[in-house]
Image: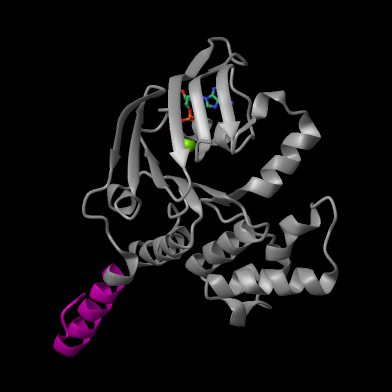
Amino acid sequence: MSSAVVKIEDLHKIYSSGEVPVHAVRGVSLEIHRGEFLALMGASGSGKSTLMNTLGCLDRPTSGRYLLDGVDVAALGRDALADLRNQKLGFVFQGFNLLSRTTALENVELPMLYARRPLAPRELHARALHCLDIVGLAARHDHFPNQLSGGQQQRVAIARALVNEPQILLADEPTGNLDSKTSVEVMGVFQKLNDAGITIVMVTHELDIAHYCKRNLILRDGRIVRDEMVANRLVAAEELAKLQHAEAAAKLTGAPA
Ligand code: ADP
Ligand code: MG
């Protein structure tokens, strides 16, 4: 058996809702294996979100095949597809998408409530708390989103994506709303999760962020124009240590970091 968690064959997506049909994805074939950490890059309009939506089973392709962990997604009805998504995939968005009147812990519990057989409340709390602990936020479990920084909110969102123990995390510009140091912190969380075996696919505009991933794929006009392994991959923990050194030095000398 192949270890491909994602296998896409000659995928096309044509949006025909407008006056002129848009051929957003034009014959993409792609295999992603367990433990990969892939950055999807390309100019605005190149088809990144369309491809991610297909990977996430949020949208059906016009033609082509998509096997998610060996299952042909096209053959599934709505409920079966929803179950598959809930079991296999975790989603992280640019805008965090947390419920504002709900604590960090309750936000993380949310995806578990959609399970076919929901866990007992004590189990829910324990699992949500464990996931907050993985992203370093167990102590903030009773905080509301507006009591958390952007980076902390994104970590809560990552905990929420983890709570059903997905095989793949899909993230569309997860650092798009964060400053550069916070972005590195979030990439550190992703690297830790990837080291623990979770496959990650993320869209990013930023080349330096893509260097924290293992594989970079570039789309242009709905086609893959480049697909390569990252040489000299950045390690978030090392980069953060460097940043802290620079900040400490700046404080001593009075120079800006
Ligand atoms: P990216 O995420 O790389 O910016 P998208 O996948 O969002 O690219 O878009 C690819 C192309 O498809 C663009 O030309 C965009 O305008 C078009 N497109 C995306 N979504 C829709 C839609 N729902 N209806 C019509 N056209 C769309
Ligand atoms: Mg997009």
The one of 40 and 183 positioned closer to us in this rendering: 40
In the rendered structure, the answer to whether residue 194 lies left or right of residue 219 reads right
Quarter of the image containing the C terminus?
A: bottom left
Look at the magenta stretch and give its main secondary structure.
helix
Q: Position of residue 143 (x, y in %)?
A: 65, 76
Q: Position of residue 169 (x, y in %)?
A: 54, 50
Kindly identify the residue that appears in the image at 83 percent across and 50 percent down.
Answer: 116
* Residue 148 visible in the snapshot: no
Is 246 within the magenta?
yes
* Residue 127 visible in the snapshot: yes
Q: Position of residue 165 (x, y in %)?
A: 63, 57
Residue range highlighted in magenta: 239-257
Is 135 within the magenta?
no
Q: Position of residue 140 (x, y in %)?
A: 61, 79
Does residue 41 lie above or below 89 as drawn?
Answer: above
The one of 168 and 106 positioned closer to us in this rendering: 168
Kindly identify the residue that appears in the image at 65 percent across and 77 percent down.
Answer: 141
Does residue 64 lie above or below 116 as drawn?
Answer: above
In the rendered structure, the answer to whether residue 114 lies left or right of residue 34 reads right
